[in-house]
Structure formats: structure tokens, C-alpha cells
């Protein structure tokens, strides 16, 4: 009988531990979502402060500080999560491609398309400078540019300068999308312009952009959780 009671007590304790852990995980996720919402105000460029977050989350300042030491820590954690998620999504679709032009056209358009599909996501990464701080993303971009130079598809004087051009175009395009320019034609135009700046002919640039977009339409629905058609 004592053994039975001991097992019951152990099971109840495990249940309490599990419930407590799940509750903490839900609150942490809720706070991070509130950080996303607070930092992605589409009409304001004012710096986000802790009061904005706790107002959005409808929690006390003390509750926030049980989970994060500072707003910067929460922003950094959320930024890392989003970067890893986005990078994984891109890799699942474009890493099998060998054509450097298609790789660039695919990766570039994915970021802009997600900003159309999830404006708060786009506003957040533009607000905190997540793109320029993503070393893995920048490394992939530079690798693709180098691949294009070696294949003769790209004629650029510097990998670093070309990467800066691409990243700058991506950030500004996302900002324009958040401001209301959400046409697919705009995304195609910016992606094509980036490829032209790398030395790709206008004809090949335009065809590559459309090929990459059409392929995203076929591949993304089964591989990327956030994807939806925006035709």
C-alpha cells in the first residue's frame, strides 16, 4: 500500500512539474509574441520600450522580468528564433539548386514574400536590423555570389559590395512592402534589378525571377509553414 501511495505521489509530482513547465513555456512564447507585436508597429519608428511590451502582453513588469533580464535579451532571443526558422525554410527549398542566379532569385524573393504574407514579421526584422545581423544568412549570400562569379553568371568587382547591395535592396524593399506596396510585380522588379546589378542580362534576370517564383509556388506549401499563395 505504501508503494502504491509512493507511486501515486511521484506521478502527481511529475504532473505538477510538467504542467508548471508547460505554463512557463506558454508565458515565454506569449511574451515573445508581444515583443514581436510591440516592435513591429507599421506606422512608428520610435524605439520600443518595456512598457510597450507589457502593455501588449497585459502582464506586470515583474512577470516580464521573471523570464527575461531585459528587453534587449527578449528581442535577441526572438530574433534568433526567427532567423533560424527563416534560414531553415530557405535551405529546404533552395539548397538543392545549383544555378547561382536561381539561388539568389529564390532566397531574395522568399524574404519579400514573407513580408507580404506576414507584415508584422517583416516590420520586426526591418525594425531591429535582423537581416544584417544574421551571419549565416550573409554567409550564404556571399557564397552564392562567389558561385556566380566562378560560373561566369555574375560580374561584380567585390563579393562584399555585391552582398551589401543585395542586403540593402532587401531591407528597403521590405520597408516599402510594410508601407503598403505588396504587389508581386514589385517583388519581381526588385529581384530582377538586383540580378542586373550583378551583371545578369535583363532577359535572363527576368526569366530567372519568374522561374524562382513559380518554383516557390510549387515547393513552399509543403515545406514552409508560413507560406500561402498571394496571387
Image: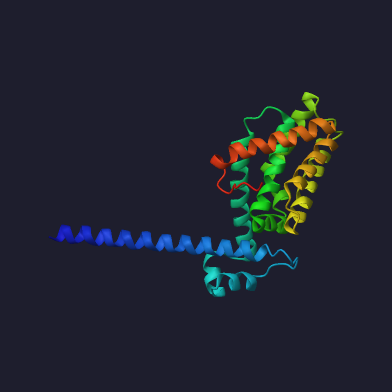
Residue 160 appearing in the image:
no
Residue 6 lies in quadrant: bottom left
Colour pattern: rainbow
Of 132 and 101, which appears nearest the observer? Answer: 101
Q: How many marks?
A: 0
Query: Which residue is outermost to the front?
Result: 231
Q: Is residue 41 above or below residue 58?
A: above
Q: Position of residue 120 (x, y in %)?
A: 65, 59
Horizontal side, residue 64 vs residue 162: left or right: left
Which quarter of the figure is the N terminus placed in? bottom left
Can the viewer see residue 26?
yes
The spot of residue 121 in percent (x, y) is 65, 55
Which residue corresponds to the image point at 62% horizontal and 30% vertical from the top-left? 96
Does residue 167 sit above or below 204 in this rendering? below
Residue 136: x and y in percent read 67, 42
In front here: 72 or 87? 87
The image quadrant that residue 53 belongs to is bottom right
Q: Residue at x 76, y 45 (%)?
A: 185
Q: Nearer the viewer, residue 25 or 122?
A: 122
The reply, left or right, for residue 45 in relation to residue 5 is right
Residue in the foreground of this view, choosing between 10 and 29: 29
Give the image location of residue 56, x and y in percent: 59, 70
In this view, the residue farthest toward the left is 1
Vertical placement of residue 90 versus 129, above or below = above
Residue at the top extreme, as displayed: 151
The structure residue drawn at horizontal position 79% and vertical position 34%, both measured from the top left corner, is 205
Amino acid at each position: 500500500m505504501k508503494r502504491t501511495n509512493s507511486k501515486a505521489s511521484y506521478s502527481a509530482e511529475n504532473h505538477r512539474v510538467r504542467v508548471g513547465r508547460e505554463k512557463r513555456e506558454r508565458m515565454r512564447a506569449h511574451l515573445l509574441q508581444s515583443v514581436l507585436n510591440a516592435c513591429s508597429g507599421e506606422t512608428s519608428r520610435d524605439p520600443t520600450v518595456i512598457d510597450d511590451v507589457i502593455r501588449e502582453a497585459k502582464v506586470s513588469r515583474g512577470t516580464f522580468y521573471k523570464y527575461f533580464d531585459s528587453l534587449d535579451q527578449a528581442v535577441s532571443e526572438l530574433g534568433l528564433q526567427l532567423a533560424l526558422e527563416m534560414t531553415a525554410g530557405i535551405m529546404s527549398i533552395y539548397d538543392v539548386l545549383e544555378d547561382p542566379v536561381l539561388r539568389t532569385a529564390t532566397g531574395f524573393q522568399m524574404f519579400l514574400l514573407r513580408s507580404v504574407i506576414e507584415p508584422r514579421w517583416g516590420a520586426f526584422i526591418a525594425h531591429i536590423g535582423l537581416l544584417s545581423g544574421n551571419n549565416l544568412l550573409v554567409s550564404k549570400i556571399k557564397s552564392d555570389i562567389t558561385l556566380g562569379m566562378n560560373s561566369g553568371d555574375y560580374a561584380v568587382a567585390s563579393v562584399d559590395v555585391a552582398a551589401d547591395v543585395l542586403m540593402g535592396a532587401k531591407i528597403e524593399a521590405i520597408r516599402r512592402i510594410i508601407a503598403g506596396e505588396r504587389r508581386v510585380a514589385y517583388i519581381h522588379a526588385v529581384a530582377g534589378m538586383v540580378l542586373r546589378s550583378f551583371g545578369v542580362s535583363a532577359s535572363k534576370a527576368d526569366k530567372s525571377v519568374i522561374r524562382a517564383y513559380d518554383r516557390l509556388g510549387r515547393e513552399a506549401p509543403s515545406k514552409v509553414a508560413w507560406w500561402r499563395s498571394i496571387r
